[in-house]
Amino acid sequence: MTPIILDVEASGFDPHSYPIEVGFVTAEGKRFSRLIKPYADWSHWCEDAESTHGISRNDLEQHGRDGREVAQELNQWLSGQTVYTDGWVLDKPWMIKLFDRAQVSMEFWVSPIEMVLSEAIIASWNEAKALQEASFREPRHRASTDALFIQQVYMKAKQLAG
């Protein structure tokens, strides 16, 4: 089984932050990514977060999509499925914030990647991550790219675990 991996980029790292980009990679390797235009009451902005992901507030205003539209698209792609994230303690609350503010019911589940890791995969994870970091050629800290990276680390760790 190849898990669907989801990643969220946000305006910062504290409770006032909100999702600005969501991306995932399907089991078949299809990628989805959307910038999210902040709602008027989503005002928190962290310069450190911006320097990490490289997305400016202006980028979101110009290229972001309405949160309701993004939530509906996510449901169309992921309805009835479980998606996994390596940052569940942040990504799940950000997804809840998006769907709550968009007034759309989330029709899929967000779960920590650890739920699909066997002991053998866990034991191989650091080696697999180091190998993937050495060969991965896409810029990191964008949602679908990070999702792809984590999915590839999972597959490499599974291969190493035998």
Image (cartoon, rainbow, N blue to C red):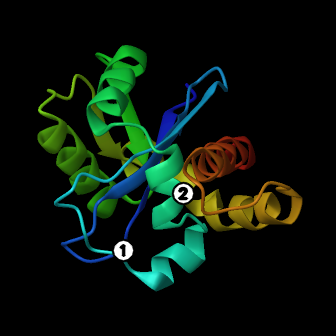
Q: CA distance from mark 2 to mark 1?
A: 16 Å
Q: Secondary structure at mark 1?
A: loop
Give the image location of residue 1, x and y in percent: 55, 25
Within-10-Å neighbours for mark 2: few <14, some 14–19, many 20+: few
> Which residue is drawn at the image coordinates 34% and 55% (left, top)?
19
- Mark drawn on residue 59: 2
Residue 150 falls left or right of residue 137? left
Residue 39 falls left or right of residue 153? left
* Residue picked out by circle 1: 12
Instruction: Say which amino acid is labelled 1.
Output: Gly
> Which residue is drawn at the image coordinates 58% and 62% (left, top)?
123
Instruction: Say which amino acid is labelled 2.
Output: Asp
Above or below 55: residue 120: above
Q: Say which quarter of the image contains residue 101.
A: top left
Pick the residue in front: 5 or 117.
Answer: 5
> Which residue is drawn at the image coordinates 31% and 43% (left, top)?
111
> Which residue is drawn at the image coordinates 45% and 65% (left, top)?
57
Within-10-Å neighbours for mark 1: few <14, some 14–19, many 20+: some
Pick the residue in front: 65 or 129.
Answer: 65
